[in-house]
Amino acid sequence: MANQPDPKFPTFSALYNHLLTLPSPLLPPGKATSPTLTSSIAALSLHPTLETAFHILNNDLPSAHFLVRHMQSPPAYEGMFLHGILHRIEGDYDNARAWYENVSGSDVFQRTWPGGKDEALGFIARVEGLKKGGDGDAEELGKRSLEEIKTVVEWCKQRFGEQRMQDASGAWVKADEANRQMAEDMVSGGEGFRKF
């Protein structure tokens, strides 16, 4: 039997409006803002990009990361962009910059960052400065972080809808051989930003 929506948050709008009352995701949170919301988010069975964004709004980065790992190449630009946002929030700025670079030509990125890639990368640099040296206005950066996520949510809502998605496997992207090899090299060959 499929998960039933949480009676407190039975719709997309009810849960989204509640998530917008939580602190803006900006710096590494350590844990989800409200761990009980994880199951409420999953129970709505939204398109994976929207579910990912909702987990990010709740600072539940492990749940968000699980989902974006299935949307790591074109045409899943929304998932790729959310992957970059997630890494920015968790403080992995080099990885965030790489994801932003990868999606900078996409419609969702251009809608979110009308000033282009330089504006977006400048924002990452300002967040990094705040985390590493306390430089910057946390309130202003938090507002911009929230606006970034809200723009992606609105884009995904228009593109994919807010209805239940019984089978999300159609949203997953199967990497071609070159991307599979690159991922394998990153995990076991010592390539890429992370060493395992």
Image (cartoon, rainbow, N blue to C red):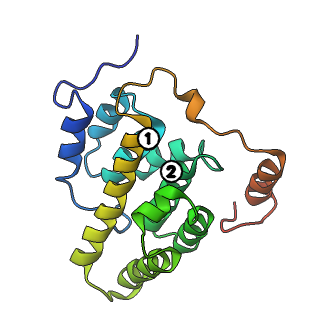
Instruction: Give 189 or 70, whichever is nearer the viewer.
Output: 70
Task: Label 1, secondary structure: give it.
Answer: helix
Residue at image position (27%, 39%) is 37
Residue 160 location (% of width, % of height): 44, 36
Residue 38 falls left or right of residue 125 = left
Name the kind of residue labelled 1 in the image. Answer: Arg
- Please name which of the two marks, 2 or 1, marks the residue nearer to the observer: 1
Type of amino acid at the residue the image marks with label 2:
Glu
Lower sequence index among marks 2 and 1: 2
Cα separation, mark 2 vs mark 1, equals 10 Å
Residue drawn at 83 percent across, 52 percent down:
178
| Residue position for label 2 | 78
Q: Position of residue 52 (x, y in %)?
A: 43, 45
The answer to whether 30 appears left or right of 88 in the picture is: left
Identify the disc placed on residue 159. Answer: 1
Q: Position of residue 113 (x, y in %)?
A: 42, 69
Quarter in which the N terminus is drawn = top left
